[in-house]
Amino acid sequence: MSEESLRHYLTQVSEMMKEVRAVEGYRYQSMEEFLLAEGTFYSAEPLTAVEEEILRRVLRLTSGPFKTKECYANALRLVMASEMLRGVDLRYAEGYAQGAVIPVIHAWVVLNGKPIDVTWGENMIGASHNRLRSIAKMLERIKYNLASHAYCGFTVPLKAVYRRAVETGLTPTFLDDWENHYPLLRDGLPKEWRQLKPPKWAVDLLAKVAKDEGRENIPTLVWKRTESYGTAGFYSSLVNLISIQASRIADPTKAELLVLLHEIAHWLADRRGHSPEFWDKAWELYHRYGVDIGYARVREQYYRTASVAAYHRYQNGEKYQEWRPKGEPTRLADFADGDYIVCQLGKRYGRRSWYYGWVRQLFGSGATRYFEDTEGTTWNLAVDTEAWPARRRAERGSVA
């Protein structure tokens, strides 16, 4: 069913309700009129590979199948699971959805403006529909609903959903809230429920930094307002998203600019965490785009030595360089038992990029060699591992 069919239905019912019903003190006379004025017709574009991976992770965190006639509970379970995945912006939504017959009141979740519906499916009559647990088949159900149905609705903040569930002990319903005399029809959509768009200066700054750095695939920018004093943010490489939680209290001209550039530096550094390369890029951005440097030094002091060291490197026109021994590395095959070895272990050993130890036993062949140190630990040295012989512990910049 198309968006035009759903819009036509909502318009016809809305006009009819205006003629037969006139309730004083209500902004809207029907749920259909409310949706036409304040709802959103969601995109029917296919899911991207990244969005499919996000949904796989969310579905792994949910338990049990998603049954028909339980759309509110199904949507709530999905958003609760997404809260455990940092950077995943999955939102609870209600409204009208048009399936095979007529539009009905329904609930689903929204991911990047696309309706994610796990309740409906291609064959809802068979008993197997309510027993489905396969993540792959659930993704097929979501894709089918996205391509076959039309959705018009509004999103509700998770805090409001939780509050309603706790107060009533039931899964929430906000649109057809007859018990509370339809507050959405009386007052309209609450201001705090409306999705906050990033300020123009932030969107322009992100685009300018990407252009200046020659980078494509610009991250999605999500902007939220919080009641906390401090402005915070994070960058998720999984979904290529920068999220800013802007304080309603703190000075936005300083805090929001600094936090946004801090998260942009995470995107540009191409490394997770606050690495030296990240801090070099962060201080470069702070100076280039007009951050109050005195404020930045105070704010970033929470990261202590790494941030301070990068600040002084920038002042001296230097860049971080990882230490490595002087001279050329030696082939692992040339090492013998009893040699003292200095190895660059690579990514497989995480933060421990250099290792010093005596070789007690060296074995293996081909692209991979193994050696056992005097502590009894066996190290797997991949083909990209470099090693230097040494008679004593290597000093910085040299091997003796």
Image (spheres, rainbow, N blue to C red):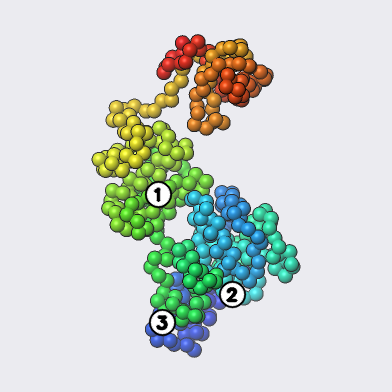
Near mark 3 (Cα within 10 A), the count class, few <14, some 14-19 or many ≥20, is some
Find residue 25 and report its horizontal and vertical position in percent: 38, 84
Task: Give percent across and percent down for residue 280.
Answer: 37, 33
Q: CA distance from mark 3 to mark 1?
A: 39 Å
Crowd class of label 1 (few under 14; some 14 to 19; many from 20; radius 10 Å): some
* Contact flag, marks 2 and 1 (Cβ < 8 Å): no
The image's mark for residue 104 is 2
- Name the residue that disc number 3 marks: 26
Tell which tag, 2 or 1, sits nearer the viewer: 1
Tell me if 252 is positioned left or right of 209 in this view. left
Residue at image location 60% in from the left, 16% down from the top: 360
Front residue of this view, candidates 376 and 345: 376
Residue 371 seen anywhere in this rendered image of the structure: yes
Q: Secondary structure at mark 1?
A: strand
Q: CA distance from mark 2 to mark 3?
A: 23 Å
Q: Position of residue 183 (x, y in %)?
A: 44, 77
Image quarter of the N terminus = bottom right
- Does residue 143 appear in the picture of this structure? no
User: Can you give x and y, in whole percent of width and height, for residue 270 in the image?
Assistant: 47, 37
The quarter holding residue 245 reads bottom left
Mark sitting on residue 145 = none
Compared to 75, does 244 lie above or below?
above
Say which residue label 1 marks: 233
Vertical relation: 269 (above or below) 156: above
- Which residue ends up furthest to the front in the rendered image? 375
Residue drawn at point x = 50 percent, y = 84 percent: 17
